[in-house]
Image: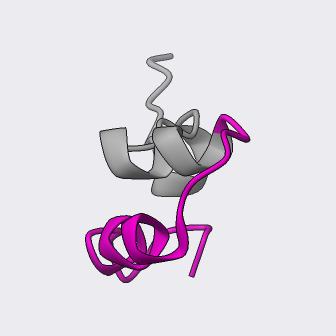
Amino acid sequence: MEATSIVTRGDLPYVPNRYEAFLLEGRNVRADVHEWLVARVAKGSRLN
């Protein structure tokens, strides 16, 4: 019997993009830079 597995998006580990990673590191970010970074976070991100 052959086992098949379908990997869904929920099964994959979360890997933030570079803008999300910078915000998630907990650094002190100026308000204008924070707005710039948030504007580049994907719509489907966990940060939105």
Query: In the rendered view, would you say 40 is above or below 4?
Result: below
Q: Is residue 32 magenta?
A: yes
Closer to us: 15 or 29: 29
Q: Position of residue 22 (x, y in %)?
A: 49, 40
11 in relation to 2, above or below: below
Can residue 8 be seen from the camera position used here?
A: no
41 vs 40, left or right, is: right
Q: Is residue 13 left or right of residue 20?
A: right
Residue 23 makes an appearance in the image: yes
Magenta stretch in the rendered image: 25-48
Quarter of the C terminus within the rendering: bottom right
Q: In screen coordinates, is 22 left or right of 47?
A: left
Q: In the figure, residue 11 lies in which quadrant?
A: top right
Count of marks placed on residues:
0
Question: Residue shown at 36%/65% (left/top)?
Answer: 37
Give the vertical position of 34 relative to 43 (above or below): above
Residue drawn at 47 percent across, 51 percent down: 20
Residue at image position (48%, 68%) is: 34
Front position in the image: 22 or 5: 22
Choose top left, top right, bottom left or bottom right for residue 38: bottom left
Q: Position of residue 12 (x, y in %)?
A: 53, 37
Residue 38 to residue 26: above or below: below
